[in-house]
Image (cartoon, rainbow, N blue to C red):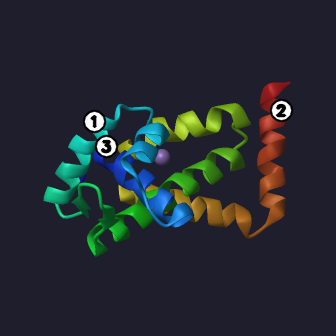
Amino acid sequence: MPTPSMEDYIEQIYMLIEAKGYARVSDIAEALHVHPSSVTKMVQKLDKDEYLNYEKYRGLILTPKGKKIGKRLVYRHELLEQFLELIGVNQENIYEDVEGIEHHLSWNSIDRIGDLVQFFEEDAERVKELEAIHQKAED
Ligand SMILES: [Mn+2]
């Protein structure tokens, strides 16, 4: 299993490749607000653990194992954003909150949160009822 920090890198690399077709060390460093030398170090570790193949000057590609987990990590992030939005968390808190919790939930919890999001998505009335409770708590 990747560590939380490895997860952040795999997630970011997956998103960069999805968006641009490639992920450069400098792009990863910028996205994660870290120094390029930290990226190089982590990328070498991810290569060793077979999440990606890295060749200096030629760039990196995710292995099937890296792609599979990258996809799940991006799904997890998006699901948690959807969940927080659904329960009425203020927009300005959502991204940072997801970054704070995403690595610390089991996949069991993620899947159950997925069920809950689905429960609300299936019927807009349910969302309205939840909003009513939220409103009452705010009053
Ligand atoms: Mn994330």
Residue 3 visible in this rendered orientation of the protein: no
x, y percent for residue 26: 41, 43
Q: Most extreme residue toward the top, as rendered?
A: 139
- The image quadrant of residue 136 is top right
The residues bearing labels 1 and 3 have C-alpha atoms spaced at a distance of: 15 Å
Give the mark toward the camera: 1 or 3. 1
Q: Amino acid at mark 1?
A: Ser
Disc marking residue 4 = 3
Q: Amino acid at mark 2?
A: Lys
Q: Amino acid at mark 3?
A: Pro
Q: Nearer the viewer, residue 60 or 98?
A: 60
Disc marking residue 38 = 1
**Reading the chain from its start, which is encountered first: label 2 or label 3?**
3
**Reading the chain from its start, which is encountered first: label 2 or label 1?**
1
Judged left or right of residue 37, residue 90 is: right
- Which residue is at a point 30% across and 61% down the rendered structure image? 58
| Residue 28 in the image: above or below residue 34 | below
| Label 2 residue SS | helix
Give the mark toward the camera: 2 or 1. 1
Total of numbered circles in the picture? Answer: 3
